[in-house]
Amino acid sequence: MKIYVDADACPVKDVIMKEAGIVKIPVILVTSLSHFSRTENPAGVETIYVDSGADAADYRIMKLAEKGDFIVTQDYGLASLGLAKGCNVLHHKGFIYTNDNIDQLLQTRYLSAMARKSGQRTKGPKAFTHEDREKFREIFKQKLAEFHDR
C-alpha cells in the first residue's frame, strides 16, 4: 500500500508524512515542476515532479496508483478516478470520498462551472482552518489504522 498526494496545493503534507511514517507506509508527493524544491524528504517519502500542465499530476497519480492505495486530493475528478480504481480517497479538509457522494460533488462542480461560464459569481472554497487540519489528522489516522491492522 502507498499514499499518493496531489501535492501542489495540499496543506496537510506534513500531517500525511508524519502519520504515514509512524506506520511505515510509503508516501509519494506528486507535484508540478513549478513547485520544485531541493529540500530532502523524510524517510519513506518520495517526490515525483510532473509538467505544469493541467491535470499532469492527476494523470501520473492514476498511472501509479493501485487498488487499495490512498490518494489525498481536493480534485473531484481525480477522486472519481481513484474510487473507480478501488483506491481510498480523502480530501484534505477531512472527508472521505465515496461512491455514494462523488456523483453529487461532481454535479455541484459542473453546475458551478456553468454558472461562472454564464457570468454569474460563485463562492469559492472556505478557507482552510486548524479544525480542518485536525479533522483530517483524525480521519487519516483512523483509516491508516484500519488498513494497517489487516
Image (spheres, rainbow, N blue to C red):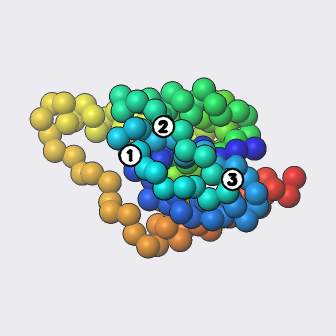
Q: What SS does tag 1 mark?
A: helix
What number is the disc on residue 35? 1
Q: Residue at x 56, y 34 (%)?
A: 61
The answer to which of 66 and 123 lies nearer the viewer is 66
The answer to which of 138 and 18 lies nearer the viewer is 18
Q: Three-letter amino acid code at disc 3?
A: Gly
Q: Residue at x 41, y 38 (%)?
A: 32
Question: For the N terminus, which image quadrant?
Answer: top right
Place residue 60 in its image quadrant: top right
The residue indicated by pointer 3 is 44
Q: Are marks 1 and 2 in contact (CB under 8 Å)?
A: yes
Residue 91 appears anywhere in the view: yes
Name the N-terminal-most of marks 2 and 3: 3
Q: What SS does tag 3 mark?
A: loop
Residue 102, image x and y in percent?
Answer: 52, 39
CA–CA distance between discs 1 and 2? 8 Å
Residue 144, image x and y in percent?
Answer: 72, 58
Name the N-terminal-most of marks 1 and 3: 1
Say left or right for 72 vs 56. right
Q: What SS does tag 2 mark?
A: strand
The residue indicated by pointer 2 is 49
Place residue 127 in its image quadrant: bottom left
Looking at the image, residue 30 lies above or below residue 14: above
CA–CA distance between discs 1 and 3? 20 Å
Q: Three-letter amino acid code at disc 2?
A: Tyr
